[in-house]
Image: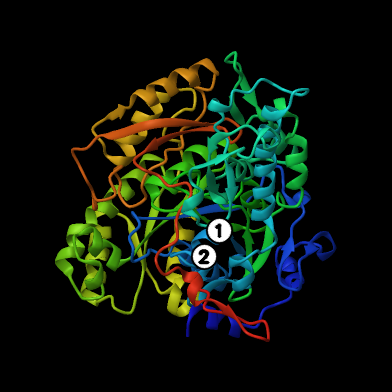
Amino acid sequence: MTDLEIAQKAQLKHINDIASKLGLDTETIDHYGRYKAKLPLSAIDESPKGNLILVSAISPTPAGEGKTTMSIGLTEGLNRIGKNACVVLREPSLGPVFGIKGGATGGGYSQVLPMEDINLHFTGDFSAIEKAHNLLSAAIDNNIQSRTNSLGIDPRTVVWKRVMDMNDRSLRHIIVGLGGTTSGVPRETGFDITAASEVMAILCLSDDRKDLKRRLGSIFVGYTFDKQPIYARDLKVEGAMAALLKDAIRPNLVQTLEGNPAIIHGGPFANIAQGTNTVIATRMGLSLADYTVTEAGFGFDLGGEKFLDIKCQSAGLKPKALVMTTTIRALKYHGGAPLADLTEPNVAALEKGLPNLEKHLENVAQFGLVPVIAINRFKTDSDEEIAVIKEAGERLGVRVALAEVWAKGGEGAEDLARAVIDIIEGGDSDFQPLYEWSAGVEEKIHTLATKIYGADGVDYSAKARKNLKTISALGLEGLPVCVAKTQKSLSDNAKLLGRPTGFRITVREIEIAAGAGFLVPITGDIMRMPGLPAHPAAERMDISEEGVVEGLF
């Protein structure tokens, strides 16, 4: 069966039953039908006592690695061995759902439900984020147009774009304000996808509503004609933006295929922003369950590093164990095997691809975390290939668990669950961030480039050098760095697979996300508004007369 068919055949429990598993009074949750609910912020403890488990992965490939599937499966496995566990994940973006990637609710017998709702509009969080973002956009252009309430904003300096949650390349670069004096002041701008919005990043890093409003007010917009910086608070719209997010700030409760709690909230991309769910959702999980499993987008060099250096430092979180998800076919791809041949046994290519896994494990060790390698098994994997990874784990002194979560759900993750519990109960991990936020901007970027990516150094364009001066003038040097980089390689060159060496990272510009509380060094050509493929996933989707969604993957 397809993922959708498996999901639609499942017998879902009422959301009250799922809330009760977390010890919640069902009168405190807001129901969105029978199978979804918003959770109360009052359920978060000041000092949550739960154990945090981070699921990461090697460098992504077109074959897929399955972090979300692994996170869900591990949660099922933990519950099967008698632990009180929940999974905390990001919400899917409609752009990838209708584009090429498809949905983001796991796969096979390791899914979160209701799959169709989560992958489509869900509880409206993305829509609220989109509206809050675009309210600021409208306020900026209205102020530029105004004669009586003008801040003197120089339209040429405005860095704030608009957003929508869809892949639409034609909106990347546009001109607004055409049509005469009553239609605004013409200027160049564009659209980003909602997941790339700073409002999304802000929601995901906010501690509470007060912190949310403060961060929204700190959004950097541009400059006045006399070179004074303008922030969202100068336009007096941060309160209205926060009001639009009054429900979006509350985490969403759903369930796994085996009826365990799943908290899903927020959805920033990891090659642009921090790539993980909200601080509020993670704290909620840690407050309500003994073990909270969460994932960070793309490879450990992106989502994993940002989770640890930005989210954990900002929120005071300390993971107790790390799961390094890998697949045999992905390692063969990093070893030079063609995409079309990845289902064929190829021990030589697998061995050539192992250095990518080894580098990510070395990176994990730099944070003081103890990992376990989770082999996300596919039916085409040979016993000889599995043995190669197990031997590599023995050589590196890292536990290895064969996880058959796609085919078997929680049953296929019991060995992985036991390995994770052993690490936690042994107190093996001692998390430490890679750098201090107080370090200089160039020092922080150099640290990531050399220690995480394996680069020889960092080069800066003239624009990036100018950006560094602006950051200094605005007094923002103490912010962490959230590098925008291709997810396909440890380097900034998507074609360099495996474990590249002898390269330098080039920073072409540095964007300011003062509200989110980080700086964004941009390397390579990073798309903030993706486009649709020649045959998007939307072409195979439909809905029956009975209201049953078809073709969603």
Q: Residue furthest right?
A: 27
Quadrant of residue 255 in the image? bottom right
- Which residue occupies the extreme left position in the image? 348
Three-letter code for the amino acid on which mark 2 is drawn: Val
In percent of the image, x 51 and y 70: which residue is there?
538
Look at the picture and state if 269 lies above or below 157.
below
Name the side, left or right, on which 92 lies relative to 40.
Answer: left
Q: Is residue 481 shown left or right of residue 22?
A: left
Q: Are marks 2 and 1 in contact (CB under 8 Å)?
A: yes
Residue for point 62% across, 42% down? 199
Q: Which mark is residue 93?
A: 1
Identity of the residue drawn at 45% across and 73% down: 405
Element type at marker 1? loop
Q: Quadrant of residue 85?
A: bottom right
Crowding at dot 2, Cα within 10 Å, few <14 / some 14-19 / many 20+, comes out as many
Q: CA distance from mark 2 to mark 1?
A: 6 Å
Instruction: List the residue tagged with mark 2.
Output: 97
Count of residue discs: 2
Residue 31 lies in quadrant: bottom right
